[in-house]
Image: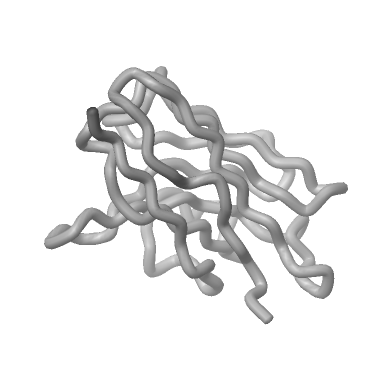
Amino acid sequence: QSLLKESGGGLVQPGGSLRLSCAAASIFPLNAFAIGWFRQAPGSEREGVSSISSSGGYKEYADSVKGRFNISRDNAKKTVSLQMNSLKPEDTGVYYCAASTNWQAGLVADQYDYWGQGTQVTVSS
């Protein structure tokens, strides 16, 4: 059983929107972890997109998505969402959610201990 599972990916036209969700397994104490969203395009390194602290009080965004993406969490429902608006072709990639016990993990991938399997996002006309 995966501890984290992403959903919500798909094919969307430029300018469109998608909402990704990261759901934690029932045994996983999501409220104890900072959560990050990362993406990886073919031939590229994994890139940090956004993160949120365990309480939801601190959020961080990559410059490339500021003003377009919004991260949120519902600890009671054990989910973290990434609302993606005004999507661009360069947003294409596999999106992963990850969990870290380090509240300062931010967008640094090696600070994250648990990873989902990813969901594909394709922005194309």
Q: Is residue 83 above or below residue 54?
A: above
Q: Residue furthest right?
A: 76
Q: Residue at x 47, y 46 (%)?
A: 9
Name the foreground residue: 108 vs 74: 74
Visual colour scheme: one colour
Q: How many tags in the picture?
A: 0
Across and down, in percent, residue 102 comes to 57, 61
Is 10 on the left-hand or right-hand side of 42?
right
Q: Residue at x 38, y 62 (%)?
A: 109
Q: Tell me the quarter of the image containing the C terminus.
A: top left
Across and down, in percent, residue 35 comes to 58, 53
Question: Splitting the image into 4 quarters, where does residue 14 fall?
Answer: top left
Is 125 on the left-hand or right-hand side of 107?
left
Across and down, in percent, residue 112 comes to 49, 67
Across and down, in percent, residue 25 comes to 75, 69
Q: Tell me the quarter of the image containing the N terminus.
A: bottom right
Q: Is residue 125 above or below residue 44?
A: above
Name the foreground residue: 21 vs 109: 21
Q: Residue at x 21, y 36 (%)?
A: 90
Is 68 on the left-hand or right-hand side of 33?
left
Q: Residue furthest bottom?
A: 1
Is 67 on the left-hand or right-hand side of 73?
left
Q: Residue furthest left?
A: 43
Q: Residue at x 37, y 32 (%)?
A: 12
